[in-house]
Amino acid sequence: MKRVIGVGGIFFKARDPEKLAAWYRKHLGFEVEEWGGVSFQEGAAAQLAPKRQSHLVWSPFEATTEYFAPSTKPYMLNFRVHDLHALLAELRNEGVVVEDKTEESEFGKFGWVMDPEGTKIELWEPPEEKAG
């Protein structure tokens, strides 16, 4: 019997959940529901993007990692996006703290921002699937 089949959610504490939800709504386009959270539906944005790989990663890091810096939180959030560079430019224009560096590899394109409570957010544009 297979037990765990995926990640069902991201749950965390916030100093001001309503204010934080409003920031995610404004800057990352979250459709925050009345109950205060978001339910992402796989494939809901398929019409917006070419066919892309769909992965959700669970990955523990060493306790001494600097990968989450400048955040001091023991976690980082990763969200898939359609057009990383366009979104980062838009977020900069909105005054969001955006790291200058980005990375591109066979795994896709990566960029990073900080939310108002100091959580590092990794934005990930998955690579397009190769016809095969």
Image: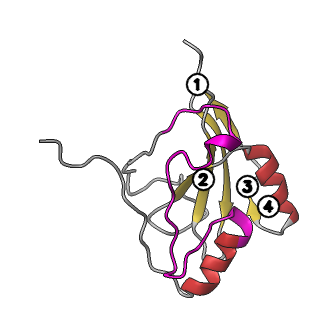
Q: Is residue 18 above or below residue 31?
A: below
Query: Which tag, 2 or 1, sits closer to the chain's start?
Result: 2
Query: Which tag, 1 or 3, sits closer to the chain's start?
Result: 3
Residue at numbered disc 3: 99
Residues under labels 1 and 3: Cα distance?
A: 27 Å
Q: Please give the label number shown on residue 71.
A: none
The residue lying at 59 percent from left, 62 percent from top is 120
Give the amino acid at mark 3: Glu
Where in the figure is residue 25, as x and y percent of width and height? 67, 71
Q: What element carries label 1?
A: loop
Q: Which residue ends up furthest to the right in the rendered image?
A: 93
10 Å crowding of disc 1: few (<14), some (14-19), many (20+): few
Residues under labels 4 and 3: Cα distance?
A: 11 Å
- Numbered range of the magenta stretch: 26-54
Query: Which tag, 4 or 2, sits closer to the chain's start?
Result: 4
Residue at numbered disc 4: 91
Where in the figure is residue 85, as x and y percent of width and height? 78, 45
10 Å crowding of disc 2: few (<14), some (14-19), many (20+): some
10 Å crowding of disc 4: few (<14), some (14-19), many (20+): some
Q: Quadrant of the N terminus?
A: top left
Tags 3 and 2 in contact by the CB under 8 Å rule? Answer: no
Where in the figure is residue 56, as x and y percent of width and height? 44, 45
Residue at numbered disc 1: 129
The residue lying at 17 percent from left, 42 percent from top is 2
Q: Is mark 3 on a helix, strand or loop?
A: loop
Tags 1 and 3 in contact by the CB under 8 Å rule? Answer: no
Chosen colour scheme: secondary structure
Q: What element carries label 2?
A: strand
